[in-house]
Amino acid sequence: MGVSFEWQQDLVTFGILSGIFLFFGITQARRAHLRVSALLLLLRQKGGKTGRLLARLAEIFGQILAVWICAYIVWTSSEHLIYLIKEERKTESLYFLMWPFFLTFLTSIGFLGISFLFQLWNEVKILAGLPGLPSMQKEEEDSGPIL
């Protein structure tokens, strides 16, 4: 008793990281993430109609950039995933294969990109004068508990 095996540390580390990665998309969808929004808030509150337009355009630009970054990470990392599968790379303890954890990471980045895509769609609809997505209409920032 009181002895831990080397592979237990790998399991806990990669298991926790996988859970955190999978939570990225949920956090983004609920806008419960950390971001610097002081300039956007200032533009919306003090800039009048032009300030609100500039803030919305900045949000759209940020979301386009985020979708592109997520797509780029998934696209360019797919070769590395294939390499991990072919070479049967393992964790430091040589007990677990790395590719399931890396696949979880790429899947979570894909979900994050989809969250950004829905927010982008919502912002563009509002900019065009159409009603936004119903689930995003009242959520401005963190709307409370995630679970």
Image (tube, rainbow, N blue to C red):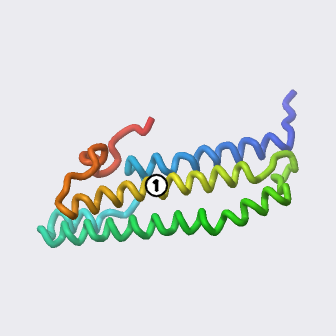
Q: Quadrant of the N terminus?
A: top right
Quadrant location of residue 55? Answer: bottom left
Image point (83%, 59%), residue name: 86
Image point (45%, 65%), residue name: 66
Residue 126, horizontal then vertical, whole percent: 22, 59
Residue situated furthest top in the rendering: 1
Q: Quadrant of the C terminus?
A: top left
> Crowding near pointer 1: few (<14 within 10 Å), some, many (20+)?
some
- Nearer-the-camera pick, 132 or 66: 132
Residue situated furthest left in the rendering: 48
Residue 109, horizontal then vertical, whole percent: 55, 56
Badge 1 marks a residue whose secondary structure is helix
- Give amino acid for label 1: Ile
Quadrant location of residue 81? Answer: bottom right
**Residue beneath label 1, please?**
114
Q: How many marks?
A: 1
Image point (77%, 53%), residue name: 98
